[in-house]
Amino acid sequence: MPSAFISHPDCMRHEMGQCHPECPERLGAINDQLLISGYLNFMNEYDAPLASIEELSRAHSALYVKELIAQSPQEGYALVDPDTKMNPHTLNAALRAAGSAVFATDLVLNGQASNAFCCVRPPGHHAEQNAAMGFCFFNNVAVGIRHALDVRGIEKIALIDFDVHHGNGSENIFKGDSRVLMCSIFEKDLYPFTGEYLPDQNMINIGLPTRSKGDVFREAVEQHWIPALEAFQPQMIYISAGFDAHREDDMGNLGLVEADYEWVTKKIVEIANKYSEGRIVSCLEGGYVLSPLARSVVAHIKVLIGAD
Ligand SMILES: [Zn+2]
């Protein structure tokens, strides 16, 4: 069965001003590299639907959702955090990004896709229950996970986050929710400066020292993630797929390369095949230098479609 590739042109209409690293060109670069790879021929492409208020409110407070919608500007920008602003198209893009995770969940659980990659922006993993931050408005992966848990009756979900930044928003939403095991590897002492203290038993947080390379990353996966995932036996796996730990990405200071993203995706697929009937929903998070971002996404998708 083919993998799903979910995106929407609206995701390229959100922009936060000239020179902002979280730019529409990110999706263009990924699309170009995917076309060159030929991998899209092995995936079913879908347009991301808009998330509903009800779907968003499973991960965010209803008040936050209402207030963010009210902040959407008719023209110009509305600043919601020092790094994060809305243009007149941001709300639609954010609703599509969150909606993609819900849609991907249904495709995978209905048996219409073996797994799914949501090629969307804005990203989501810094968005907390009650706050937009770090280029994120709605926590896309969290909205998808709560849909799987609360609507589709899945009981145990693993959330894997390999973005160079700690997913403080996902941690804020899922801490203490024993249905979710969050496994995170990120660079220590980097924005958002969270994740160093274990907030609950369902969080496996591994902060890597600055300038760590793939060998250190792989060892952390083998030592910390895999045993926790084996013990938890998730019925479904979500990935916060950020590619800014790449050595060519200057948003962080880790030294991963495409082969590391291919390797970690294989590890996740192995766990998914063992416990989760192969069910994976992967959502794009960070990755800001266009060429390494696009090459890394292709390495990730290569494994998801089984072309490795
Ligand atoms: Zn990041």
Image (cartoon, rainbow, N blue to C red):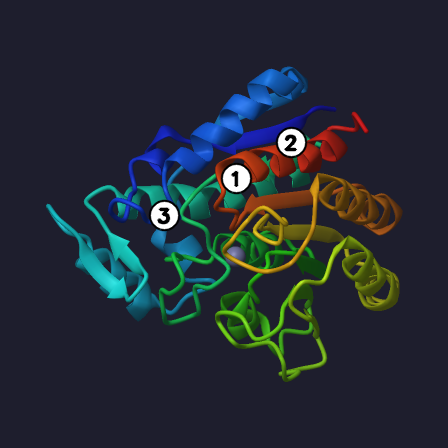
Are the residues tagged 2 and 3 within 8 Å (C-beta)?
Answer: no
Report x, y in % for residue 35.
Answer: 57, 18
| Quarter holding residue 232 | bottom right
Q: Residue at x 81, y 42 (%)?
A: 266
Q: Is residue 193 left or right of residue 295?
A: left
Beta carbon at label 2 within 8 Å of ligand 1:
no
Q: Is residue 80 left or right of residue 101?
A: left
Q: Which residue position is annotated with label 2? A: 298
Are the residues tagged 2 and 1 within 8 Å (C-beta)?
Answer: no
Quadrant of the rendering where the N terminus is positioned: top right
At label 2, counting other C-alpha atoms closer than 10 Å, the crowd grade (few under 14, some 14-19, many 20 or more) is: many
Q: Closer to the N terminus: mark 2 or mark 3?
A: 3
Q: Is residue 277 left or right of residue 22?
A: right
Q: Residue at x 37, y 41 (%)?
A: 50
Say which element carries label 3: helix
Q: Label 2 is placed on what type of residue? A: Val
| Quarter holding residue 269 | top right
Q: Which residue position is annotated with label 1? A: 103
Q: Which residue position is annotated with label 3? A: 94
Q: Closer to the N terminus: mark 2 or mark 1?
A: 1
Say which element carries label 1: helix
Distance Cα–Cα, label 2 vs label 3: 23 Å
Q: Residue at x 36, y 37 (%)?
A: 24
Distance Cα–Cα, label 2 vs label 1: 22 Å
Q: Label 1 is placed on what type of residue? A: Phe
* Residue 76 seen in this snapshot: yes
Up-down relation of residue 78 to residue 201 (above or below)? above
Q: 280 and 62: which one is in front?
A: 280
Give the number of the mark in front: 2 or 1: 2
